[in-house]
Amino acid sequence: MKIAILSRNAKLYSTARLVEAAENRGHQVRVLDVLRCYMNITSHNPSIHYRGEDLTGFDAVIPRIGASVTFYGTAVLRQFEMMNVMPLNESVAISRARDKLRSTQLLARKGIGLPVTGFANNPDDITDLIEQVGGAPLVIKLLEGTQGIGVVLAETHNAAESVIQAFMGLKANIMVQEFIKEAEGSDIRCFVVGDKVVAAMKRQSRPGEFRSNLHRGGTASLIRLTPEERSTAVRAAKVMGLNVCGVDMLRSTRGPVIMEVNSSPGLKGIEAASGKDVAGLIVEFIENRFKTLESTKEKPSSQPSPRTRTRGKG
Ligand code: ADP
Ligand code: MG
C-alpha cells in the first residue's frame, strides 16, 4: 500500500515507529507536514498540493495531528477523505475527541462511566455548580488543556470558587469535575486498535502530585485490566468513532470512569511499558480495513470482476 503520515516532524518517536512498521510490512510510506499541504476544495477532482507537487495515489492516511493544529489538520485530512484515501481515524472523529466537553456529553449519553462533571458560563452560578459535582475537593480543567497543564485540584470550596472565578475572568472555557480521590494519583491508559485494547499501562503521579501525566513527572508501568475496564475502553472508542485511540480512565469505587479519549496517542510510553509492537498492530489494522473496504467497493456491480485488482499489499 501507499501510506501517508500527517505529522509535523518525521523524527518524533511515534512517527518514526509508524514509518518503520509500515516499511517492514512492505508498504511505501511518506511523512507529510500537514501545514505544508494546501488544496483546491472546489474542483470536481479534489486535490492536495505539497511544496508544488500534486499528491496522488495514496491508499491510506495516518493522521498524527497535534492539538495546536487541529483546525487546519482536520481540514487537510478531510480533503484526503474527499479523494477516497482511507483515514486511520476520520476527521470528524478527531474534531469530536479534541473537544473535552463534547466528548464527555457523548460518552454520558451512551451510559459510559464518567466523573460527575459540570460546566457553566456565568460567575453567579459557581456555588450551585460546585454543589452539583459534590463539593470540594474538586478538579477544574481548562477545556483546551493537554499534558496536565490547566488541570487544578481545589481542596476547599473557597479555593474552588476563586480558581473558577479567575478562569472565568480570563474568558477561559473550563469544566468542573468530581475529584476521584481513590485513584490515588494514578490513571490507566488503554490503547485501542479496532475493537481491542492491544496494550495498557498504569501511570502513577510523582509524590505530592495528583496528575499522573508523564510530562508532569509521572511513571508508567504494566497493568492487568479487568474485563469491565477493557470493555469500557472499547465502547468509548466506538462512541467517539475512533479506530485507534488512547482511552484514559480512573479506577473509582463505582468502576472505571473515563477522563478523555486521545485521537493521536503517543507510542513511546505504551511500547516501553508493554513491550508490544503497537505500531505494527496499527499498520496491520490498516491493511485489514483497506482489504475490507476494497472488497465492499467492488460489490455494488454484483458482477464478477473482469480483472483482479493489483492494488493490494506491496
Ligand atoms: P490532560 O488532557 O491535560 O492530560 P486530564 O483530564 O487527562 O488532562 O487530567 C490530567 C491528570 O489529572 C489525569 O491523568 C489524572 O491523573 C488527573 N485527574 C484528572 N481528572 C481527575 C479527576 N476527576 N479525579 C482525579 N484525578 C484526576
Ligand atoms: Mg490526560
Image (cartoon, rainbow, N blue to C red):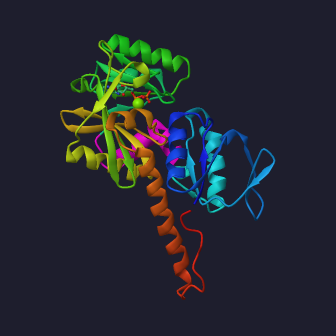
- 190 or 279, nearer to the observer: 279
Seen as rendered, the residue at the extreme bottom is 303
Quarter of image, ligand 1: top left
Nearer to the camera, 31 or 174: 31
Residue 20: x %, y % from top left: 52, 45
Residue 194 visible in the shown view? yes
**Residue 297 coordinates in the image, percent (x, y):** 54, 74
In this picture, residue 171 sits left or right of residue 142: right
Q: Where's residue 42, x and y in %? A: 77, 58
**Residue name at image x 35 percent, y 15 percent:** 154
- All told, the count of numbered labels is 0
Horizontally, residue 126 falls left or right of residue 1, namely left
Quick check: 176 above or below 25?
Answer: above
User: Quick one: quadrant of the N terminus?
Assistant: bottom right
Q: Which residues are magenta?
A: 93-113
Q: Residue at 29% x, 30% y: name it.
A: 221
Question: Foreground: 300 or 24?
Answer: 24
Q: Is residue 121 above or below residue 54?
A: above
Q: Residue 72's x, y, as percent?
A: 66, 41
Specify the quadrant that holds the C terminus. bottom right
